[in-house]
Each structure stands twice: as structure tokens, then as C-alpha cells.
Amino acid sequence: MSFRMYAREISPPVRISLLVVTLVSLGICSELKVRVRLSDGLIGEEILDANSENDDITVEFKQGDGTHITVVFDFKRHYADLWKVGIGLKASCQSGVTVQPGETSHLVEEPVEKDVRIVRALILGEPERGQNQYQVLCFVSRLDHHEIIPTEFMARLRQLFCDGILQKNPHLVRTAEEKRGVEHLHMDMAVNVSHAGHLYTLIHNLCKEAHEGFYTRTADTKHWLDKGIETIEFEPLPQTVDVSGLQRCPSTLDLWQPCFCSYHLRLEWLPCLLKYCRSRRGAAGRANPYKCGIRSCSKGYRFDYYVPHKQLCPWDEET
């Protein structure tokens, strides 16, 4: 019996069920999953997803202590609606950035590249020590395009893993070919979440719970302004020179004293570069380069920022 004849004998409800099963089967492998050895020595799983429509890449993993890390690399060219709020910043591309609380800047909307990296950490607390059940940190900064391959190539890489071409052994623990150093980011601006209701959807969904832990940098804010993107409402944080006697949190004994906090994380496996090979010499005698693979990297991040009391920085302890 042919498939066409068989299909005519299938009742409509069964056809719908088969269609659903088929669609689900096609969508099973929608993410790239990579087993890695985390910094604490445990084996974890990174989940990498490329959204071609939004032109962004998401990396997620869970640390041994239960902390859930989400990193989004947003490349998309978009109209100037990255931040849609009134801001406490007065800026000029010629004169630089000056902070003038209460003033609002209105910029012309033009197509620009966002170039945004969003790092979100959902950290489990210890209620018995007076901490909340969990705390959310969000760090928004400028994206370096050399950190990760473009979205279109990540989508192709994911498909190669899904097809089993690159993932012969799903239990293999992968090690990055290149171990990059730690990027040190001094987050000197606190984002006011309560006035961020019009932040573009991606940041709003990721960071809406970061009520006391949403940060960015003056330099990145100026870059986005120079690109024609409205920025966020923020409060400049105290600097070391501004607060006499301010210490790092590990050296601060009083839980309710202000201090400088640090948060560290490392992405153990990222497809960071495209590899190029040379083809055999053709009739013209020239060898043309072509894309023939990816190079994997690991990279660390350290975020330093001010907290009004040490209780908001329980993970930063002397080692």
C-alpha cells in the first residue's frame, strides 16, 4: 500500500496527532548542548541557542552551587529603541558624557547595531543567614564581536550537532582550544529597574527581578549614545575616591556597611572564531580561503561594583 493511499485512510484526528508528533520531532534539537568541566571541577552542561530572527545568541548553564547563568550576545541592527525611558543623562557626541540628574535626552531614531552583552546570574541565597531565597544580578555592557561567532554560523553549528555530524559522543566533556584571560569590568552605573518599564523586551525579561543588582558602565552608555541609542535611567555609583575608607566586601566586617563587591564567572566553551582553510590552487594559480570550522575558547568575566551593604555580596569572600 502506498503512503498516499494509506494517508487517505487515516482519520482527521489521527492525522493531526501525527502532524504534532512530526513537528515536535523536528524541533527536539533546537539547542546546542555541550558538556564542560566547570571551574569548581564538576561536570556541567552549557546550552547554546542562536536566534537568527533576533540576531542574538544565548548561553546558559548551572553552576555547582545552583547559580543559573544566562549570557546573551545581541548583534541585531535595530532602530534606536534599545532603551525607551527618560534618562538622567545629558550627553553630546562632541563634548562627552556629563551626568545631570533630572534632565531628559531625546535622540533621533536611526538604524544602529546594538552590540550588547547581557550577563544574568540567579544566585540562590541562604535564608537561615538572613538572605533572600535568591538574588538576581544583571550586567549590561558593550559586546566585543571577537567573543563569539556570528549568529548565522552558530545556527549552522547547532544544526551540525543536531545532525550528529559533530556530536558523535553526546557524553564527551569538551575542553576549549584557547583559554582566554579574565575581562575586568568596573560597573560604575546602577540601573533603576523601577523606571525601566520600556526597556527593550530582551533586557526587560532577563533583568526585571534585578532590583538591587542591575549595572552598566559610563563608557558603554556613551558608546550607545554616540550610536544614536537612547540610554537607561541610572544612578552613578560611588567610586573609591568618593567614599573615604570604603573597602572591598571581603575586608568589611559589618554586614550593613557599604563596600565594593566582585562577581566572577567563566564560560568554559564558546565558538569564538571561524577557521579558514585554503583551497587547492585553481587554474589561475591562486588558493582561495574558505570557512572550514570554528575555534573554541573559554573566557572569564569579573564585575566590580559598589553595594550599599555587604549583605548584598555574600559570595565575595576571602580565599
Image: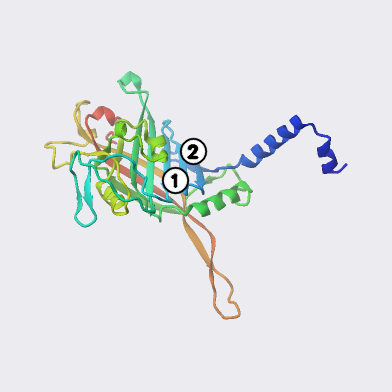
User: Residue at 28% across / 33% down in the picture?
Assistant: 317
Left or right: where 119 falls relative to 195: right
What is the residue that sits farthest to the top in this orientation? 128
Between residues 314 and 54, which one lies in front from this camera angle? 54
What is the residue that sits farthest to the bottom in this orientation? 284
Between residues 265 and 7, which one lies in front from this camera angle? 7
Asked if 136 appears above or below 89 in the picture, the reply is above
Asked if 168 appears above or below 282 in the picture, the reply is above
Mark 1 vs 2: CB contact within 8 A: yes
Where is residue 89 shown, x and y percent of the image? Answer: 22, 44
User: Residue at 47% across / 54% down in the picture?
Assistant: 150
Number of other residues with Cα within 10 Å of mark 1, as a class: few under 14, some 14 to 19, many 20 or more: many
As helix, strand or loop, the secondary structure at mark 1 comes to strand
Residue type at the position of mark 1: Glu
Where is residue 270 shown, x and y percent of the image? Answer: 46, 49
Report which residue position mark 1 lands on.
Answer: 268
User: Residue at 32% across / 43% down in the picture?
Assistant: 302
Where is residue 27 shown, x and y percent of the image? Answer: 62, 40
Mark linked to residue 44: 2
As helix, strand or loop, the secondary structure at mark 2 comes to strand
Mark linked to residue 120: none
